[in-house]
C-alpha cells in the first residue's frame, strides 16, 4: 500500500507524474482494486491502464 500512498500523495503535491495522476483520479473502491492487483504481481502502469474510465460510483 505504501507505493499507492506515495502515488496519491505525489499527485496531491503536484509532483506525481502520469501514473500518480491516473491513480489519484480513481474512486476509492477502484484504488483498492488497483492496489490488490499490484500486490498480486501486476505492473502499476498496466493495472492503471486496464481500469475502465470513467468510473461510475
Image (tube, helix red, strand yellow):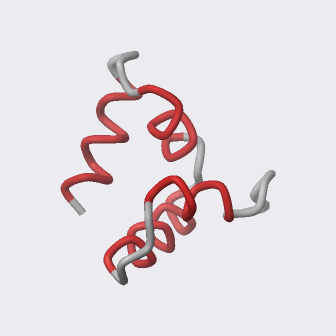
Q: Residue furthest left?
A: 2
Q: Nearest the camera: 33 or 49?
A: 49
Q: Quadrant of residue 42?
A: bottom left
Q: Nearest the camera: 31 or 46?
A: 46
Q: Quadrant of the N terminus?
A: bottom left
Please name the residue shown 68% across and 64% down the image: 50
- Horizontal side of 3 relative to 7 (left or right) equals left
Residue 49 screen position, x and y as percent: 65, 55
- Horizontal side of 56 relative to 16 (left or right) equals right
- Horizontal side of 25 relative to 40 (left or right) equals right
Q: Quadrant of residue 38?
A: bottom left
Is residue 24 placed above or below 53 in the rendered structure? above
Q: Quadrant of residue 37?
A: bottom left
Please name the residue shown 59% across and 41% down the image: 25
Q: Nearest the camera: 48 or 56?
A: 48
Q: Nearest the camera: 50 or 26?
A: 50
Please name the residue shown 50% across and 47% down the image: 23
Residue 11 screen position, x and y as percent: 41, 28
Q: Report how many numbered discs are placed on residues in the image.
A: 0
Q: Residue furthest top?
A: 14
Please name the residue shown 38% across and 27% down the image: 16
Residue 52 screen position, x and y as percent: 76, 62
Amino acid at each position: 500500500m505504501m507505493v499507492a500512498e506515495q502515488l496519491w500523495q505525489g499527485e496531491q503535491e503536484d509532483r506525481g507524474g502520469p501514473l500518480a495522476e491516473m491513480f489519484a483520479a480513481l474512486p476509492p473502491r477502484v484504488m483498492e482494486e488497483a492496489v490488490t492487483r499490484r500486490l498480486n504481481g501486476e505492473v502499476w502502469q498496466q493495472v492503471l491502464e486496464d481500469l475502465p474510465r470513467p468510473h461510475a460510483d
